[in-house]
Amino acid sequence: MKDIAIYIHIPFCISKCYYCDFLSFPRLDGSVDRYIDYLMREMDLYKESLKEYTVKTIFIGGGTPSYIGEKYIYKLLNHIYKNFNCNGLEEITIESNPGTLSRGKLRIYKEVGVNRISMGVQSLDDRLLREIGRAHSSKDFYNSYELVRDMGFENVNVDLMFGLPNQTWKDCEGTLEKAIQLDVEHISYYGLILEENTLMNKWYHEGKIQIPEEDLERAMYHRGIELLEDNGYSHYEISNFSKEGLECKHNLFYWELRPYIGLGLSSHSNLNHKRFWNYNDFTRYYDSLDKKELPIEGEEKIDKRMEVAEYLIMGLRLIDGINRKEFFNRFCMEIEDVYGEVLKRYEAQGLLDIDTENIKFTPKGLDLSNIVYVELLPE
Ligand SMILES: C[S@@+](CC[C@H](N)C(=O)[O-])C[C@H]1O[C@@H](n2cnc3c(N)ncnc32)[C@H](O)[C@@H]1O
Ligand code: SF4
């Protein structure tokens, strides 16, 4: 049996945050029932091809999965248990927004096996939350967090953002300190990316808002790392920090380039040396499934050269980098056989730290990682 991870996309939200480019639709409540039904049909179509796999992790993401009724989460997870081998299942995460959780929802999540709650918090400063279009306040977060703990969840992640308009280091520090005080098990600390199709990007280009200069943005990142590490969090991936042994097992499947399938609108999969992705509109998604076909919009075969490049690019996101032995076991060659000259050059420039066991980014390399990635991709 081989291990696999399953991602399920729930594209519904209360409202659209100003910075967000994830596929999500505000207040489409009338579409939820049908969408869940089709997600289960999609699972049915995978039943045969995943016979030799055992599901290790499930991630229900979005959008806002906690926005829809708990009965849907119950149905989806039970359908997975019915269709696939789940004997070795270790982690089931559900993404949630403060203010959308209730005792009733959390009870069902627990009953159906969810053991990790990820909360999108972004900031605990109410002015900032309003300015980025969040539909909740810091108080909503504290109330939801208390419920989550009260219902016995012992593995909680919070997503935080830095580099937001008008954000200062003091704002970031305040939010990080509050999360640390709550003793959350995992923190994702993301730098704002101005995505093209967002209101925030439009306002930025119209000069209506300003975002922190690059130096300040980088300082927010480095000081954040320092604060979290000083308080017992291990920095294990560019944007992710956890208490000992509580790394997100699901995301490790992505970073270690292990097999995963994505179900639902716009989800991506990586299986049998192929990468494929689903339609991102309801009509084509439903039409395919009506014809009993997987709703796949496109696919790419990953040849060995590309797989090596992706393994390096994803693996370098991890702070421990790439283990040479694991690389050799997977590809039957040394990393230097493919990238000897490039690696040496970046080592000389102080971007990579190369020893007999691992190849990883230096702190300077983490800041300039995008430059390195471009050169690792085959022509
Ligand atoms: C799939 S999203 C949304 C999860 C959940 N609906 C929420 O908003 O809390 C996961 C996380 O990505 C981060 N994110 C979304 N858009 C971003 C952007 N433009 N730049 C940086 N981080 C972003 C946010 O921290 C968010 O919580
Ligand atoms: S950040 Fe989360 S809540 Fe906001 S629009 Fe995106 S998916 Fe929805």
Image (cartoon, rainbow, N blue to C red):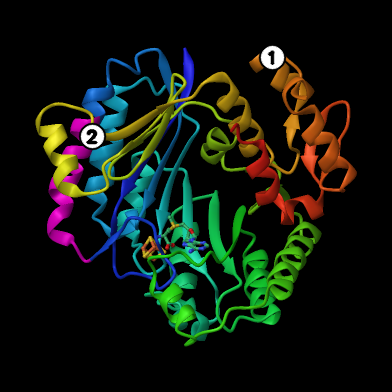
Q: Is residue 133 left or right of residue 213?
A: left
As for residue 33 lying within the magenta part, the answer is yes
Range of residues picked out in magenta: 27-42
Some atom of ligand 1 lies within 8 Å of the CB belonging to the residue at label 1? no
Picture layout, residue 125 above or below residue 116: below
- Circle 1 crowding by C-alpha within 10 Å: few under 14, some 14–19, many from 20: few
As for residue 90 lying within the magenta part, the answer is no
Q: Is residue 242 visible?
A: no
Q: Nearer the viewer, residue 48 or 313?
A: 313
Picture layout, residue 235 above or below residue 167: above
- Residue in the image at 87% along x and 48% along y: 350
List the residue tagged with mark 1: 329
**Mark number for residue 295?**
2
Residue 240, percent across and down? 63, 52
Q: Is residue 276 left or right of residue 173?
A: left
Q: Quadrant of residue 327 in the image?
A: top right
Residue 222, percent across and down? 76, 64
Residue 66, percent across and down? 33, 57
- Circle 2 crowding by C-alpha within 10 Å: few under 14, some 14–19, many from 20: many
Q: Quadrant of residue 331 in the image?
A: top right
Picture layout, residue 376 above or below residue 188: above
Secondary element type, mark 1: helix
Residue 215, percent across and down? 74, 73
Q: Nearer the viewer, residue 312 or 90?
A: 312
Q: Earlier in the sequence, mark 1 or mark 2?
A: 2
